[in-house]
Image (cartoon, rainbow, N blue to C red):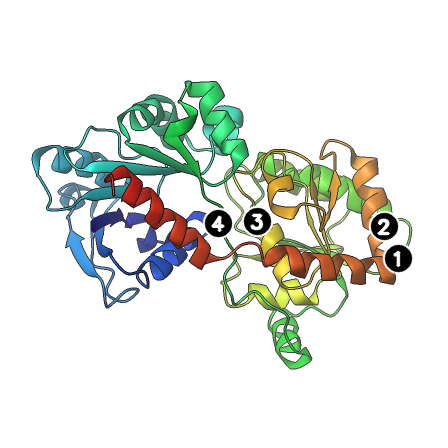
Amino acid sequence: MKVGIITERLNQQKTGVDNAIYNLISELSKQTGIDIYLISSQKNNDLFPELKNISIHDPFKRILKKTSTYSWYLFINYYLSKKNLDLDIIHNPDNSSLFINLKNKKIVTIYDIMAFKFPKVSDPVTRFRYRILLYKTLKSSDKIITISNHTKLDLMNYFKIPEDKIKVIYLAANQTYKKLGKNEINEILKKYDLNNPFILYVGGLAPNKNIERLLESYNIIKNKEISQKLILTGVKRHNSTSALKTIKKLNLQNDVIFTGYVPDEDLPGLYNAADLFVYPSLYEGFGLPPLEAMQCGTPVITSNTSSLPEVVGDAGIMINPYDVDELANKMYEVLTNEKLRKEMSKKGLERAKLFSWKKCAEEHLKVYEEVLGR
């Protein structure tokens, strides 16, 4: 079976979706009966030297002086409509970017429909891509993979996609997320100059992440004289203004620490060092950070909305993300109850065992076989 996987996203700084694509390909390459071709504007030999590449260069590069992800995707649709690649399947694990009909079997992975539910989170080009092209992508695909039952229901409700056309395959946390020894943890604390116990949040500051209410909840428990700082990781973007204003309004400049972007190799140390991981997001297609935290044995508080209950189950504490007082009370309860923290840590480690990239890859292979009628 020859499967072409579009990997253009791997040519940038890796975040959640990019890491998911990388880990999926890593595990798929270990499966038998599949020959993987990586389709991109440049060869991914540094990431996957053992795999074949189909390099399709963006002609707009001469004008833009660099390859733009958006212009490349427009061109790849045109290119694939004219060329008949010797592939059984083309799989685009990057949402709505492959919207044409293909002679090959076509599979697309949809992570969420954020641009519909939280349009302010996305830049104008992304909103256009979703709102104009997502429906075309869904209709022209032979099979749709989603990463949670919540996203599956969104696709069925918003776009009237038949249930049997959608397959739910859960993501997983990388195996580097695990319990670490004191020396490894101390190295990370030293690197980021962290000298106080802390509560950790991992992710961006976009509106759907609900950071303003997290800050308000933290302000409540800070006034109860807890010793923990609040660590926020992630890049400050155009839609981070509200969170920054809230910090200033609540006078939390000395209590909230921004680390900026944290590379994958440092995150396990931060998870391990945290007394508590809090993720009060309003909407997630899956929500990898809570799973990463659980796999490190860190107690987790997260929202009872969207896909997050599917990931955390009964291993974490679920809260109404709109209720500032409830979040504050649960944070304070966990931070002041060592027995509870240990129980949550144990449950989280057990829950995390249900998810693996090997299982994810095996289920993808079954979808490929199903689409080909094997």
3 vs 4, front mark: 4
Mark 4, other Cα within 10 Å: few <14 / some 14–19 / many ≥20: many
Q: Secondary structure at mark 4?
A: loop
CB of mark 3 within 8 Å of CB of mark 4? no
Q: Which of the two discs, 3 and 1, labels the residue nearer the N terminus? A: 3
- Which residue, given by chain and number where applicable, does mark 2 sit on? 332
Q: Which of the two discs, 3 and 4, labels the residue nearer the N terminus? A: 4
Q: Is residue 280 among the parts visible in the rendering?
A: yes
CB of mark 2 within 8 Å of CB of mark 1? yes
In the image, what residue type sits under mark 2? Answer: Tyr
Q: Which of the two discs, 2 and 3, labels the residue nearer the N terminus? A: 3
4 vs 1, front mark: 4
Q: Residue shown at 73%/41% (left/top)?
A: 318
Whole-percent x and y of residue 233? Answer: 59, 54
- Gap between marks 3 and 4, in whole Å? 17 Å
- Which residue, given by chain and number where applicable, does mark 1 sit on? 336
- Gap between marks 2 and 1, in whole Å? 6 Å
Q: Secondary structure at mark 3?
A: loop
Of residues 333 and 51, the one nearer the viewer is 51
Label at residue 33: none
Residue 124 lies left or right of residue 245; in this view the side is left
- Which residue, given by chain and number where applicable, does mark 4 sit on? 171
Residue 168 lies left or right of residue 301; in this view the side is left
